[in-house]
Image: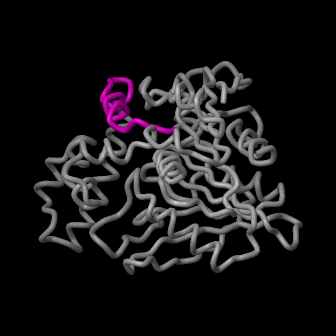
Amino acid sequence: MPIVKSHYNPPHIFKNGHFSTIYSGLYRNVSGVYQKRERVTLSDQDFIDLDWSYAAYHQNVSKLIIILHGLEGNAQRAYIKGTAKLFNNSGYDAVGMNFRSCSGQPNRLFRSYNAGATEDLREVIEYIIKNYPQYSHIVLKGFSLGGNMLLKYLGEPIRIPKEVKSAIAISVPCDLKSSLTQMKRLENYLYSRMFIKYLQKKLEYKHASFPSLITLEDIKAANSMLKIDHLYTSRAHGYKDAFEYYMKASSRQFISNIKIPTLLINAKNDSFLSKDCFPIEEAEQNENFYLEMPKYGGHVGFFTGTEVYYNEERALNFATLA
């Protein structure tokens, strides 16, 4: 489809990408979302926790949105709850999928999650369809790393269940290697240090459970995103090294095969994204794939001045019309 024209025009200070990113990530609060946790045992005997919230004042609900968080996020983040609240108020049940190790309790295996772990998303969707047959209309929404996973899932050569009707992806580094290069820029130093700190802490838990597989010395020496992906992310998930992981897990190569209506919103002032994270040619050649590139928004920002953020209202609108 042609590129979608964006009408997002935030209040003046939120036109700064960094301010939009930081405010929405650290200071936004979403109230009135009551989540019920369900633990799903996976086929490899690990687990994933799902956080459910339900449609307000609706009975016999047949619509569901499944929401995927970003790197080191969880289903309690404001951007997850904001989407859940809007969709709940519009007649959808919602479920936030916490990736392995992200629900507040370490997962059981040495592996955890990564940007290309579509096997986990596939298994969760199949579980929901089998155990909750009332959901005949499922919408998917993914943010950042979760958005990459979502786009990859949609474009892989495996049948998508008929219940999955549409998808929305937000702030997606769909070319992982070039996004990593972008994160090395000075303007992203604080973000990178934050992610590295969180990931190193996670790896210390892995060392405690699997001391023969990873050492504290190696963890301490892994002081960059690339080194962490070389040390752990790649080899724990079956890749030769970080570069093979970036190559095979990047979602851009899968976009041309997407067969259901899918919207990607990537802001032009998102400091996490390189020019290779804007799949313009794919949007022009795939009638199912819509690309919106607002001038503003930062990374998972999109503040509007109201309780509902721009990416949320666009997601609901797209899901309704798709």
Q: Is residue 72 magenta?
A: no
Q: Residue 254 location, x and y as percent?
A: 47, 43
| Magenta segment boundaries in residue numbering | 172-189
Question: Residue 321 sits in which quadrant?
Answer: top right
Q: Is residue 218 left or right of residue 139?
A: left
Q: Nearer the viewer, residue 5 or 25?
A: 5
Quick check: 235 above or below 1?
A: below
Quick check: 105 above or below 222?
A: below
Q: Is residue 63 left or right of residue 247?
A: right
- Magenta segment's dominant SS is helix
Question: Residue 31 sits in which quadrant?
Answer: bottom right
Q: Nearer the viewer, residue 276 or 305?
A: 276
- Quadrant in which the C terminus appears: top right
Q: Nearer the viewer, residue 262 or 232?
A: 262
Looking at the image, what colour scheme do you see? one colour
Q: Residue 97 location, x and y as percent?
A: 55, 63
Q: Residue at x 84, y 64 (%)?
A: 56
